[in-house]
Amino acid sequence: MVDDFDSFRMTVSRMLQEFGCRQVDTAVSGQEALRLCEATEYDLILCDFNLGRGRNGLQVLEEMRHTQLLRRSTLFLLVSAESSREIVLAASDYEPDGYLTKPLNGKSLRQRLDRVLHQRQAMKSIFRAIEDNYLDTAIVLCLQKIDEGSRYGIFCQKLLGTLYVKTGQLDLAEQVYRQVLEVRDMDWAQVGMAQVKRAQGDIDTAIDWLNQIVDQHPLCMPAYDELADCHNELAHNDERQAILERAVDASPAALLRQATLAEVATANNDKVTAAKTYKRVVKLSENSVHDNVDCHLAFTRAAAAVFSEDDSVGRDLLRDAIAVIDKVEKKFGKDECRHRQLQLIECQLQIQQGNQKRANELFLEANKDMENLGLQDVETELDRVLAMQALGQRDKAQAKLKMLVEAFGHDEVALRKIDRLLEEPVSEESKQQVAQINKEGIRLYEQHAYLKAIECFQRARRLFPMHMGVQLNLVQALVGQMRTGDNSQEWMDTALSCLTSVEAMLTGGHPQFQRFRQLQQMVRQVDVERQQQRRA
C-alpha cells in the first residue's frame, strides 16, 4: 500500500488484513515503493497517484513497466482523489489493472479486489506461459477459456489476437477480430484489424481503419500510436506529426508520446511545435524513469531556434530555456562536451535577451576550448555555427559550414543535420527530397494549381529554410495565386519574407540574382495592383 498520508495508508492496510491478506507492506513514497518491489514480488499493489514530492503513482507504474519489475500476474491498482480524463488516459498507456477513486470504503474495495483477484487467478496459467515465452501454450489456454464460456472470454479474445499477431499467425488474428466485431464494435478489435492489415502489407487499408477509429473513438490512444507508426513507415512525416498532435491534445500527460511529437516536429523543422512540445517533455519528465539530458538540451536548442520563426513564442520560452541550462549540470553532472554545448546555446539565448556582453563571453570561452581540441561532434559544431550567426559573424559561420561539409563528407547522418543551415543540401537523402518536392510543386504550378503548389513549396521551405531555389519557387507560386484575384495579406507577407531572406544571402554574381530581381519586380507590381483595387 503506497500513500504519503499515514492515516489513509494505515486504514487501507487494516482493511486488507481484515480481507485475509497475510502480509501488507506500506510505503510513503514512490522511491520506497520501488525499493520494496525490487526485494519482493507482490500479488497486489495499491498506489496513490499523488505521493507528494518525488515520483507520483503513475511514474511508479511507468518505471516498474520499463524495468520489468511488474509481473503479469501482479495486480497494480492506481488510487486517486480525482478521476480527471488526463490522468486516466496517461495511466492507460501503462495498463494498470484498475483505477480506484477516493474515498474508499471497505465494501466497495472488497468488491473491486474480489473481481480483479478472481480474474488474475483464472488467467494465472496463461500469464505464466507468456512470461516464460511459451506463446503457443498461452494460445491453447486462451482457446480453452473461450470454448468453456469463461466470464473472461472477451479478455481472452483480446489477448489471443495479440498472441496470434506476435507469432505471425495473421489470418487467425484477423478471424478473432472479425468475430468480435460481428458482435460488438470494440475499438481494440478495430485496432487489431488495422495491425493485421499493416503486417500483411496492406498499409493503406490499415490507415483507413485507423482514421475511422480515431474519428469514432477519439480517446483510443493505441489507434493514434498505430496510425503514427503507419505514416512513419511510409515516410509521411507531416501526416505523422498531425496525428501525434491530435493524440497529445487528447492525452497531454503522456510523456513518451509528447517526446515523439517533439522529435518529429524537429525533423520536420517545425520550430514552434518542437519548442513548445519539448518544454512539456521537460516538465513531464521530472522524476520519470525516462528523464534524460538529451530532452533538456533539445528544449534549449529549440527555444533558441524558434526566434527565427516566431519571435513572440521565443520570448515566452526564453526564461524557461535559460533556467533549464542553469539546472542541467546540477541534475545530470558535468561533462566537458555538454558544457560547451550549453555555453553556445546560452550564447544564442543571451543575444535574444539583449545581453551582448554575456553572449560574447560564453562564445569566446567555448570557442577557445574547441579551437584547442579540434573537430567536435556535429551537434556541437552546429551549435557554434548558430552562435556565430547570432553574434552577427556571418562570414565566419559560412566558412565554418563549408569546413564541416568537407569534414563530415563521409557521414550522411551528419550531413543531413548540416543541410538545414546550407543554401543547397549536400546529403543524398536531402537532395533527393528537395528535388522531389520541387518537381511536384513545379508540376502543380504549371497546371495553375497555385494553392497546392504553394503548399508544396512551403513544406520544402520549412525543411530547407536557406534554399534559395525553393524560396523563389514559392514566391512565383504566390504571385500566380495573387494574380487570380486572391489578395490575401498572408500571401503578400510570405512573398516579402522569402524575398528578404534570399536578398540577405545573395551576391551580384549569384546564379539566382537575375531571377530574384524579376520576382521582386513582379511582387511589387502585384502589390501596386492590390492597392489600386482597394482604392477603387
Image (tube, rainbow, N blue to C red):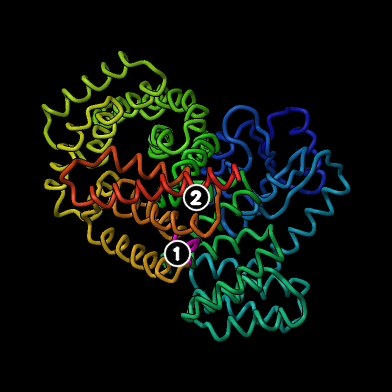
Q: Position of residue 67 (x, y in %)?
A: 48, 49
Secondary structure category for the residue under label 1: loop
For residue 121: magenta? no
Q: Residue at horizontal 60%, vertical 54%?
A: 247
Quadrant in the rendering for residue 47: top right
Bounds of the magenta segment: 449-453
Q: Position of residue 434 (x, y in %)?
A: 31, 60
In the foreground, 107 or 52: 52
In the foreground, 449 or 296: 449
Q: As shown in the figure, which amino acid type bears the numbered disc 2?
A: Leu
Q: Position of residue 339 (x, y in %)?
A: 29, 27
For residue 450: magenta? yes
Residue placed furthest toward the top:
357
Marks 2, 1: nearer the viewer? 1
Q: As shown in the figure, which amino acid type bears the numbered disc 1?
A: His
Answer with mark 2 or mark 1, whichever residue precedes in sequence.
1
Q: Position of residue 349 (x, y in %)?
A: 38, 25
Label 2 CA crowd tier, 10 Å (few <14, some 14–19, many 20+): many
CA separation in Å, label 2 and label 1 = 14 Å
Residue tagged by mark 2?
Answer: 261
Asked if the residues shown at circle 2 and circle 1 are in contact, with their CB atoms under 8 angstroms apart, the answer is no
* Label drawn at residue 236: 1
Q: Residue at horizontal 42%, vertical 33%?
A: 307
Q: Residue at horizontal 27%, vertical 52%?
A: 515
